[in-house]
Image (spheres, rainbow, N blue to C red):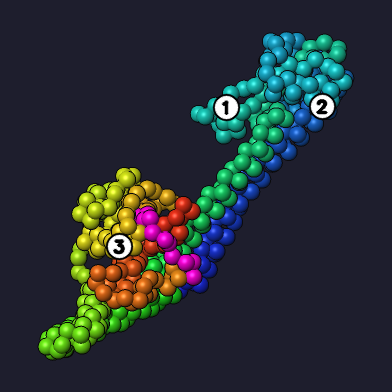
């Protein structure tokens, strides 16, 4: 059975189209068969009515003694006719269907009295008795009655109901076929949605995003190519971080050696050299720190941001103004480091840090405000680049090597989020961190 199922996407779409067409046509054939039978029964009923209309004047033209003989000859397998002095139907049955049939016959017979009673079907009777029937009593002008018991002689309203039922069943059947087709189509295109979601995650910097290699052949090939691309980019990133870490680590030894030698010189000559070497040491430490941020092996878990922010602010002298948001999934130490860098920058350059937590757009949002001078619009994005700083010094006292924002954005993007900077209307800078909720 699996061999008959197409492997390619085009083949599966073709199979879906063929199956939908076959199902729709099969339903139409079955329903048309029932409708043909219904129309045939209605045509037969109309012929019976026309025969009765023609029979009544003939009965009135005969003597009462000869009328039973004509009635027997006029009887058929579906309609039994009798002539007698008393009506078969004692009184007209109330109801719109019986009344409509009575009016129709009375008009065709020139206004003669017609009594109608509906007969319930007999499931255990002969086949022609299993359908709904009617009993008729037609008054003759010369006296006497023509009594008719007919099966399948349906009132006009019953015929109309049969047509509406046909259209209703046909519509429901086509809707069912459409619903099944849409569900199958959704199943076929689900791998595309998975690929799109993984591509968005990769665009945010998540190198762990992978796509299940399932579905049609083209989908499997696309998923395999994406997974291979992700693995290669992850390898390149890891190699780049290893090189940065090695460079930063190897620079420490000559910098330390040069500092020792510089300190042996006169103080006036040594001071500028030591200051330069200190800045180089800060840069080397920053390289190691930046490389470490990209290759930490900490396990991801659900993180309650409110508790993390409360603890972080207490440790760093910031003010946590509260708020609430759903848990996020991430690496607690890495998130503490990323948000801690932003808090440290706010305290260092803005004199204070106020932190709030809220939800917006289905994500957890952390806002960090300071009271500093802000940053010009044209420089805000540039500050996220490695070694970019708001002032030229590289000393540890004034901020370090300029890797804090770059490290923070790298960590947050790896968690599927991001960070933005904006100047507040009342003065100061605002850093906004967005993280997706745990799923």
Q: How far is disc 3 from disc 2 in space, using C-alphas?
A: 107 Å
> Which badge, 3 or 1, is on the more N-terminal residue?
1
Instruction: Answer few, some or many: residues within 10 Å of disc 1's Cα (few below 14, many 20 plus, some between 14 and 19).
Output: some
Quarter location, residue 105? top right
Quadrant (top left/top right/bottom left/bottom right) for the N terminus? bottom left
Magenta stretch, main secondary structure class: loop
Secondary structure of the residue carrying tag 2 is helix
Q: Nearer the viewer, residue 333 or 424?
A: 424
Bounds of the magenta span?
368-378
Question: Mark 3, mark 1: which one is toward the viewer?
Answer: 3
Task: Tell me if residue 207 can be seen.
Answer: no
**Residue 55 place in picture, x, y as percent:** 81, 26
Residue 24 vertical position relative to residue 198 in the rendered view, above or below: above
Query: Would you name the residue on which mark 3 appears?
Result: 348
Is 116 covered by the magenta stretch? Answer: no
Quarter location, residue 238? bottom left
Residue depicted at 73% across the width and 38% down the height:
43
**Residue 86 place in picture, x, y as percent:** 73, 10
**Residue 62 place in picture, x, y as percent:** 85, 19
Secondary structure of the residue carrying tag 1 is loop
> Which badge, 3 or 2, is on the more N-terminal residue?
2
Question: Mark 3, mark 2: which one is toward the viewer?
Answer: 3
> Is residue 312 toward the left or the right of residue 21 in the image?
left
Query: Would you name the residue on which mark 2 appears?
Result: 53
Residue depicted at 34% across the width and 49% down the height:
356
Instruction: Answer few, some or many: residues within 10 Å of disc 2's Cα (few below 14, many 20 plus, some between 14 and 19).
Output: some
**Residue 389 place in picture, x, y as percent:** 36, 73
> Which badge, 1 or 2, is on the more N-terminal residue?
2
Q: How far is disc 3 from disc 1 in space, using C-alphas?
A: 94 Å
Residue depicted at 30% across the width and 59% down the height:
347
């Amino acid at each position: 059975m699996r061999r008959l199922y197409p492997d390619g996407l085009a083949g599966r779409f073709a199979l879906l189209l063929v199956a939908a067409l076959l199902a729709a046509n099969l339903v139409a054939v079955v329903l048309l068969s029932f409708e043909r039978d219904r129309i045939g029964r209605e045509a037969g009923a109309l012929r019976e009515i026309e025969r009765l209309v023609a029979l009544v004047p003939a009965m009135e033209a005969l003597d009462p003694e000869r009328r039973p003989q004509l009635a027997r000859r006029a009887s058929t397998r579906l309609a039994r006719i009798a002539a007698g002095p008393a009506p078969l139907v004692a009184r007209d049955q109330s109801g719109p269907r019986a009344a409509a049939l009575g009016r129709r016959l009375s008009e065709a017979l020139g206004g003669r009295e017609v009594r109608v009673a509906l007969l319930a079907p007999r499931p255990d009777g002969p086949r022609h008795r299993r359908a709904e029937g009617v009993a008729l009593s037609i008054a003759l002008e010369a006296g006497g009655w023509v009594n008719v018991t007919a099966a399948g002689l349906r009132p006009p309203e019953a015929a109309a109901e049969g047509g509406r039922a046909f259209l209703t069943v046909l519509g429901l059947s086509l809707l069912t076929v459409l619903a099944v087709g849409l569900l199958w189509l959704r199943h076929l295109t689900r791998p595309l949605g998975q690929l799109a979601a993984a591509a968005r995650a990769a665009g945010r910097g998540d190198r762990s995003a992978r796509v299940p290699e399932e579905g049609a052949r083209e989908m499997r090939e696309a998923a395999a190519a994406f997974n291979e691309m992700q693995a290669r980019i992850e390898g390149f990133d890891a190699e780049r971080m290893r090189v940065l870490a090695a460079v930063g680590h190897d620079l420490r030894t000559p910098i330390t050696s040069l500092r020792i030698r510089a300190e042996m010189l006169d103080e006036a000559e040594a001071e500028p050299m030591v200051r330069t070497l200190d800045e180089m040491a800060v840069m080397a430490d920053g390289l190691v720190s930046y490389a470490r941020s990209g290759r930490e092996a900490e396990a991801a878990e659900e993180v309650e941001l409110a508790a993390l922010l409360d603890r972080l602010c207490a440790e760093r002298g910031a003010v946590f103004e509260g708020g609430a948001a759903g848990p996020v999934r991430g690496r607690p130490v890495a998130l503490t480091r990323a948000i801690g860098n932003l808090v440290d920058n706010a305290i260092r350059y803005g004199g204070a840090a106020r932190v709030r937590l809220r939800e917006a757009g289905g994500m957890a949002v952390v806002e960090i405000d300071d009271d500093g001078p802000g940053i010009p619009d044209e420089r805000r994005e540039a500050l996220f680049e490695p070694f970019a700083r708001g002032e030229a010094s590289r000393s540890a006292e004034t901020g370090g090597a300029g890797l804090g924002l770059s490290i923070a954005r790298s960590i947050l993007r790896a968690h599927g989020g991001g960070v933005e900077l904006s100047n507040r209307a009342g003065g100061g800078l605002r850093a906004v961190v967005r993280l997706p909720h745990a799923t």
